[in-house]
Amino acid sequence: MKRTLPVAISGFFGQHQFTQWGYVFALSVLCLLPVLLIFIFCQKFFVTGLTAGSVKG
C-alpha cells in the first residue's frame, strides 16, 4: 500500500500508549533531509527572488 510520508510516520504511533519513538524520529529526519538539502543548495536563488520581488519599479 502506498502512503505519504506523514501518514506512514503516524502509523508508528501505536495503540495503548506504546509508540516506537526511535522509528518516528528517524523517519522524521529522513523526511526533512531532502527539503533541507534543496534549501541549502538553492538558498542563493531564494534570496535573490525575495529581494527582487520586494523592490518597486
Image (spheres, rainbow, N blue to C red):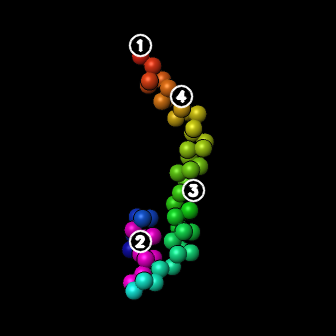
Q: Earlier in the sequence, mark 2 or mark 3?
A: 2
| Neighbourhood count class around disc 2 (C-alpha, 10 Å): few under 14, some 14–19, many 20 upward | few
Q: Earlier in the sequence, mark 1 or mark 3?
A: 3
Q: Earlier in the sequence, mark 2 or mark 1?
A: 2
* Dots 2, 3 in contact, CB < 8 A: no
Residue identifier under label 2: 10
CA–CA distance in space, label 2 to label 3:
18 Å
CA–CA distance in space, label 4 to label 3:
23 Å
CA–CA distance in space, label 2 to label 4:
37 Å
**Residue at disc 1, secondary structure:** loop
| Neighbourhood count class around disc 3 (C-alpha, 10 Å): few under 14, some 14–19, many 20 upward | few
Relative image position of residue 8 (x, y in whole percent): 43, 70
Amino acid type shown at disc 4? Thr
Quadrant occupied by the N terminus: bottom left
| Neighbourhood count class around disc 4 (C-alpha, 10 Å): few under 14, some 14–19, many 20 upward | few
Q: Earlier in the sequence, mark 2 or mark 4?
A: 2
Residue at x 57%, y 39% (from the top left corner)? 42
Amino acid type shown at disc 1? Gly
Residue 26 has which mark?
Answer: none
Residue at x 41%, y 16% (from the top left corner)? 56
Residue identifier under label 4: 48
Residue identifier under label 3: 33
Relative image position of residue 41 (x, y in whole percent): 61, 42
Q: Is residue 8 left or right of residue 20?
A: left
Residue at x 42%, y 65% (from the top left corner)? 6
Q: Is residue 34 above or below residue 39?
A: below
Q: Which residue range is magenta in the image?
A: 7-15
Q: How many marks?
A: 4
* Dots 4, 3 in contact, CB < 8 A: no
